[in-house]
Amino acid sequence: MNDLTMKSFIAEPLQRNKVEFWAATTIFVFALFSLITADSPNEHLFRDAGYDFQHYENYFWPQLLRYSLLYLSFLLLNFRVLPGFIAKQKVWLHVFITLLTFVVLSLFIGIFDTYTKGYLFSRFETEDETYSQIFQISFSHTLWLFLMFGFYSAIKFTGLYLLSNSMVIQSKYRMVTRDALTAFVFWMVSVFLLLIMDVGEEITVVWAVFSLSALLLYCISFYTLIPKSLKTKKPLRSYILRTLLVLALAFLPIAFVVMTVVYHEDSSFGISFFNTLFQLAVTVPVTWVLFKRHTKGNEEVYVLKKELGRSNANLDFLRSQINPHFLFNALNTLYGTALQENSERTAQGIQMLGDMMRFMLHENHQPRILLSREVEYMRNYIDLQLLRTSTSPDIVIEARIEDVLAERYIAPMLLIPFVENAFKHGISLKEKSWIRISLHTDQSKLYFDVYNSRHPKLEQDPEKDQSGIGLSNVKQRLDLLYPGKKELIIRETPEEFFVHLTLDL
C-alpha cells in the first residue's frame, strides 16, 4: 500500500468500513467452509460418555447458528454501536444495545452448547448443574469475545491515529518514522491474532517481547547509535559496544515485565536472556546492513538529482540558445522581403512569424507537444523562407511533409534546427542551390531527411570558420531526451549536406 493509498484509507471511513466488512465476511465464509468439510472434534466425547452422536443435531446446525450470530454481532457492534460511541451520539441507547447483544449472545451460545457439549450431562449429578456449568462457560466466553473486540478496536483506532499523524509525531521525535509506526501497528495486530488463536501463553509472550524489542532497538540504532558510532575510528565495534550496553540495561526491566504475565521467575529471566541473544545475533547486524544500504541509496539519489538538475539546466540553456537564432533569421527574411516587394507579402510573412513566436512562447517550454504542432511550425518556417527565395530561379526547394494524423508526441524544437541549417548554409542568391526535405511516420517511427547544397564561404564572411550552435545543440538534446531511441546520420561532401533522423516516438 503506497503512501497515497494509505492516506486515502485513513481519511475515508467508508473505505475502511468496506475493508473491514469484506475481511469479516471472508472469515465467516472460511468458517462455514471448514464447518462443511470438517468433522466434529467432540464426537469421541459423546461416544465415551455413552451418548449417540448426531452430526447435524450435535455439531453442524448449532455451529452454523453460532458462526452466523457472531458474524452479525460483529457487524452490529463495529459499524453501528462503536461509531455511535465515538461520535457521542445516543450514548445510552448504544450502551443498551451493547448489553442486550452481550446477554443475547451469551444465552444463545449456551443453548447451542447444550447440543454440541451434550456429553457433559454424564459428568454432573443433575441436569441443573450441567446447564449451570454450560451457561457459565458461555457467559465467560462471550465476555472474552467482547474484550477481544475492545482490544481490536483499540488497535485499529490507535494505528489509524498514529499513521494519520505520523508527520507531526516525526517532527517532534525524529526516530518515530512512518515505517516505525506501521511496524508498531503490525506488532499490535500480530499479538492480537496470537491471543485470538490461543496458540499458548509462552509463544505469545516470546513473540511480543522479541518483536517489540527488535523494533525499539532498530529505531534507537538507526537514528542514534549508528550515527554516533560513525564518528569514531572503528564505527562497527563502537556500534556493537553501544548496543551491548543498551541490551544490558534493558535485561532486568524486560524480565520484570515478562514476570507480570507468566508469573514464573525462571521463565521470565530465560525469555529476557534469549531475547538479548536474539537481538545481538539478528537485529544488530541487520540494522547495520540496512543503515549502510539506506546511506548508499541516499547518496545515489543525491547524485541523480544533481545530474538531473544539471541536465534540465543544460536543456533549458540549449533551448534559450536556439530560439533567438530562429527569430533573427526570420526578421532578416522579413526585412529583405519588405525591400523587394509590397506590403502584402510582408504582412503574410509577419503573420507566419507571429505564429512561430506564439509557438515558441507557449509550447516550446513544454516537455512534449503534438508532432502535428512541430510539423506546422516547420511548414511556417519553410513558407517564410520561400518568400525570400521564390523570385530566384536558381533556387529549388522541395518539401514532402506528410500530415500527422495520429496523436504522436515529440519534444519541441527538435526538427527545425536541421531545416534552419539547410537554409543557412544551402542557399546562395548567386549560385544554383537546392534543398529537399521529407518527413513521414510509420506507427511510432518518425523518418526525417534533409538535403541541401553547399557553397564555399567568402573570406570576409564572419561565420566562415563557425559551424553554428544549432546542430550541436540538437544532438545534445537528442542524447538527453531519446537515449537509445534515435538514429542520426549526418554526411557531407563538398557539394552536398545530408541529414537522416529516425526517431522512436
Image (cartoon, helix red, strand yellow):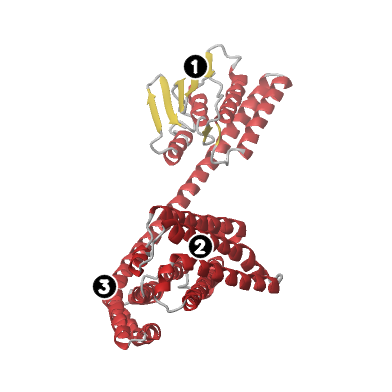
Along the viewing direction, whichever of 362 and 343 lies nearer the viewer: 362
58, above or below 464, in the image: below
Which of pointers 3 and 1 lies earlier in the amino acid sequence?
3
**Marks 3,1: beta carbons within 8 A:** no
**Marks 2,1: beta carbons within 8 A:** no
**Marks 3,2: beta carbons within 8 A:** no
Q: Residues within 10 Å of mark 3 (few under 14, many from 20)?
A: few
234 with respect to 213 (left or right): left
Amino acid type, residue under disc 3 in the picture: Ala
Pair 3/1: label in front: 3
CA gap between label 2 and label 1 equals: 95 Å
SS for callout 2: helix
124, above or below 63, in the image: below
Which of pointers 2 and 1 lies earlier in the amino acid sequence?
2
The x, y position of residue 245, in whole percent, is 32, 84
Report which residue position mark 2 lands on: 66
Report which residue position mark 1 lands on: 433
Q: Residues within 10 Å of mark 1 (few under 14, many from 20)?
A: many
Q: Residues within 10 Å of mark 2 (few under 14, many from 20)?
A: some
Amino acid type, residue under disc 1 in the picture: Ser
Amino acid type, residue under disc 2 in the picture: Arg
Residue furthest toward the right? 343
The x, y position of residue 420, in whole percent, is 52, 28
29, above or below 244, in the image: above
Which of pointers 3 and 2 lies earlier in the amino acid sequence?
2
CA gap between label 3 and label 1 equals: 81 Å
SS for callout 1: strand
SS for callout 3: helix
Residue in the image at 32% along x and 69% along y: 288
Report which residue position mark 3 lands on: 281
